[in-house]
């Protein structure tokens, strides 16, 4: 794949399906940046728009700013790091299978519907700059039936659905978070230890079969 | 079961003068209807478990078995049918949403049966397909509005990607998970032999079947199961599933019990975890959003593959299809409300959506009126039961048809409508290895080839009778159709005259 050197402001599908190479984006890209990304590396030196990393399979996307709605939609692998905030419906439908565990890390806060229908993978919201409130909007984890969401906050999000279980992080959780926070600080600065010293909630589904009791054969 | 007020719907009639007690029936029935009673020295039945799939009947070497509708009945009337009563008992006992399989079971008009095909007499003589060439080759995709020539007068080929089919019949989407590995293999091999395509549905593509890629449509639906670069590259076309005729407006839930072994690996989700496809794509809220997905799929496959958008036939289908045609889709698949499914809420299956005949005619007309008919091809599905249905669809405006229930019947399905139980005795809608092994892909593929070959020949004969020698000339040729027993509004929507006119 020929690596394009410069991209237009608002250009869509940058790095779509890329399997290798590094792409640096200096102006705000259009939607679906790194869709189906399959191993490449994308660094955005400003904010990104909607559907960043849609259905991405491998590789890394780093956004030095905020990312729009549906960031990491249906991710299957790889990692997305967003320095500031994420929009609505981030990380929905993330999956995992054996060693393919996608990661979405957001430094600030996310909008509503974070991790809706989440079936796997790890979402970490650090809540930097919004320490006085929950760093996510409404309906976090609705329909969640796999994976885990870590929130660095003392405030539980509003309207948590029934099938989401809230817990304090165990040592295995901290081991999982540590390298992600490390990578975040490597990219954007900050002190990993002071971030890790904050209070976290772990959100996990309390069933992997949320519809089990819903039906009767006819 | 007595406390649920549900009595067996079927009676197992065993002719004891023929039964040798060989227990073949017991071995064949995954529902556990038959067992040998040692005390009585004979086979006995538990009818409450029977779904009337005929597996035992077909395998009884002595022809000692019959399954008949039990004459035990409710005091039915025209308003309260036995089904309506039974469904209330089921829900009162469980509190559950009624779940059914296969297509709409209710008595709505089947317009195919009210449409008649023309034939030539005297002038414009008919054509004998055994003697003269009849073209059933079909190209699905955008057709350019204009031709361009270079300075030397040579045509500049600018044809958008096309799906080339030897016959205008494709196998519709059924996921690996909802149907078995052997069923998928049968479909894939038949599609290859027939020069047509089968469709993965939303369950990913098993590694073993990548070699049938040139005859595979890969589906992308709201759950995005199994979707990755290699998968998109593997297919001959990519289908975005927006809706399904059997359950418009809702998504799918493949229960964790069916997510086992290779199904889990192909979908790339853990064993035993539900596979949930939500009702909408959560990144599509407008035609512009749909366009974004269409073009992201084109982008990742370098524009080499046509993109199909599949929608359910619903009330405003013509306006919706017009929007979809403008989204950049190359092909629109419309699925009527009689289309099948491995599981759907009964109420939605039986009450939501509209017949494919009306939807297809309305869409074709709308796209013609707007001058954009050639910018997309149309595939019609949702209970095409015969070559006559297929040809009527083409005459109403379809470029090709999708079949799925008919294909399953060819594989041995007896339409017992119990797919959701996962205990398909014919090895089709099941993941139990001992049941899957009952479907031999060699035989299955051959039966599918037989069916579609026969249909294709019948289509040629009917076309020949009309003096038409190509699908191209039959498409949208509504003058070749007449309605019978239809009112003026129906005739108007279908765009056909009444018989005798």
Image: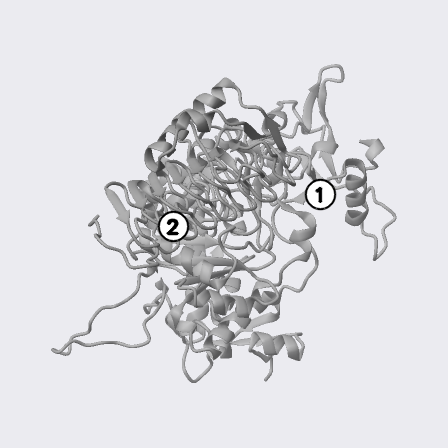
Residue at x 65%, y 24% (from the top left corner): B20
What colour scheme has been applied to the protein in the rendered image? one colour
Where does residue A62 sit, x and y in percent of width and height?
35, 41
Q: Quadrant of residue B158?
A: bottom left
User: How many marks do you count on the picture?
Assistant: 2
Tell me if B300 is positioned left or right of B68 in this view: left
Q: Are both tags, 2 and 1, on one chain?
A: no
Name the residue carrying label 1: B97
> Disc number at residue A47?
2
From this viewpoint, which residue is outermost toward the top?
B39
Residue A203 numbered mark, or none: none
Q: Position of residue B309 (x, y in %)?
A: 45, 58
Q: Residues within 10 Å of mark 1 (few under 14, many from 20)?
A: some
Q: Please provide percent x and percent y for residue B152.
A: 11, 78
Nearest the eye: B35 or B422: B422
Which residue is located at x 48 percent, y 35 percent?
A126
Of residues B366 and B300, which is closer to you in this image? B300
Q: Quadrant of the N terminus of chain B?
A: top right
Residue A99 seen in the figure? no
Disc nearest the viewer among 2 and 1: 2
In the drawing, does residue A73 fall left or right of residue B421? Answer: left
State whether residue A38 appears in this view: yes
């Amino acid at each position: 794949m020929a690596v394009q050197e410069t991209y237009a402001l608002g250009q869509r599908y940058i790095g779509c399906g890329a399997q290798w190479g590094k792409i640096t984006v200096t102006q705000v890209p259009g939607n679906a940046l790194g869709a189906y990304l399959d191993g490449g590396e994308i660094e955005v030196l400003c904010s990104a728009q909607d559907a960043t990393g849609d259905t991405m399979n491998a590789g890394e996307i780093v956004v030095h700013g905020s990312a729009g709605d549906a960031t990491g939609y249906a991710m299957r692998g790889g990692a997305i790091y967003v320095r500031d905030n994420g929009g609505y419906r981030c990380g929905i439908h993330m999956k995992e299978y054996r060693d393919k565990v996608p990661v979405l890390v957001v430094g600030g806060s996310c909008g509503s519907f974070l991790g809706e229908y989440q079936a796997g993978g790890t979402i970490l919201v650090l809540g930097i700059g919004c320490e006085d409130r929950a760093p996510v909007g409404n309906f976090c984890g609705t329909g969640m039936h796999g994976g885990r969401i870590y929130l660095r906050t003392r405030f539980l999000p509003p309207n948590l659905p029934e099938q989401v279980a809230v817990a304090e992080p165990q040592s295995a959780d901290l081991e999982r978070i540590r390298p992600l926070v490390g990578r975040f600080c490597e990219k954007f600065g900050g002190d990993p230890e002071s971030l890790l010293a904050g209070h976290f909630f772990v959100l996990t589904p309390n069933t992997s079969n949320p519809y089990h009791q819903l039906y009767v054969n006819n | 079961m007595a406390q649920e007020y549900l009595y067996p719907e079927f009676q197992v009639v065993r002719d004891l003068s023929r039964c040798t007690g060989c227990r073949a029936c017991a071995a064949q029935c995954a529902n556990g209807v038959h067992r040998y009673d040692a005390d009585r020295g004979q086979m006995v039945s538990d009818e409450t478990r029977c779904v009337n799939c005929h597996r035992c009947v077909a395998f009884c070497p002595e022809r000692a078995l019959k399954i008949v509708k039990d004459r035990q009945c409710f005091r039915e009337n025209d308003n309260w049918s036995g089904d309506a009563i039974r469904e209330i008992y089921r829900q009162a006992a469980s509190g559950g949403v009624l779940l059914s399989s296969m297509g709409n079971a209710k008595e709505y008009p089947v317009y195919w049966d009210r449409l008649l095909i023309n034939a030539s007499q005297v002038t414009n003589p008919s054509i004998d397909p055994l003697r003269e060439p009849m073209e059933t080759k079909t190209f699905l995709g955008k057709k350019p509005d204009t031709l361009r020539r270079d300075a030397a007068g040579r045509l500049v080929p600018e044809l958008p990607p096309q799906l080339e089919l030897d016959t205008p019949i494709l196998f519709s989407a059924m996921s690996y998970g909802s149907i078995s590995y052997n069923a998928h293999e049968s479909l894939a091999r038949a599609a290859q032999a027939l020069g047509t395509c089968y469709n993965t549905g939303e369950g990913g593509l098993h590694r073993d079947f990548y070699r049938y890629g040139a005859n595979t449509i890969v589906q992308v639906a709201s759950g995005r199961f199994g979707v990755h670069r290699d998968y998109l590259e593997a297919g001959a076309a990519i289908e975005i599933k927006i809706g399904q005729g059997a359950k418009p407006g809702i998504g799918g839930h493949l229960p964790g019990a069916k997510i086992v072994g290779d199904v889990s690996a192909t979908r790339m989700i853990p064993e035993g975890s539900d596979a949930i496809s939500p009702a909408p794509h959560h990144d599509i809220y407008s035609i512009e959003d749909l366009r974004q997905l269409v073009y992201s799929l084109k982008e990742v496959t370098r524009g080499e593959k046509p993109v199909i958008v599949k929608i359910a036939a619903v009330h405003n289908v013509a306006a919706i299809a017009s929007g979809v045609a403008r989204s950049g889709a190359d092909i629109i698949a419309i699925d009527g409300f009689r289309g099948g499914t491995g599981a759907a809420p009964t109420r939605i299956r039986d009450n939501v959506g509209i017949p494919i005949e009306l939807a297809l005619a309305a869409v074709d007309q709308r796209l013609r009126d707007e001058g954009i008919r050639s910018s997309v091809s149309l595939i019609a599905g949702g209970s095409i039961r015969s070559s006559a249905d297929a040809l009527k669809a083409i005459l109403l405006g379809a470029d090709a048809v999708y079949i799925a229930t008919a294909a399953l019947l060819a594989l041995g399905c007896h339409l017992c409508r119990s797919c959701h139980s996962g205990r398909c005795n014919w090895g089709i809608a099941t993941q139990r290895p001992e049941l899957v092994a009952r479907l031999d892909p060699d035989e299955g593929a051959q039966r599918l080839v037989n069916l579609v070959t026969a249909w294709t020949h019948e289509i040629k004969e009917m076309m020949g009778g009309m003096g038409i020698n190509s699908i191209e000339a039959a498409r949208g040729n509504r003058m070749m159709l007449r309605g019978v027993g239809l009112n003026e509004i129906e005739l108007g929507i279908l765009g056909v005259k009444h018989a005798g006119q």
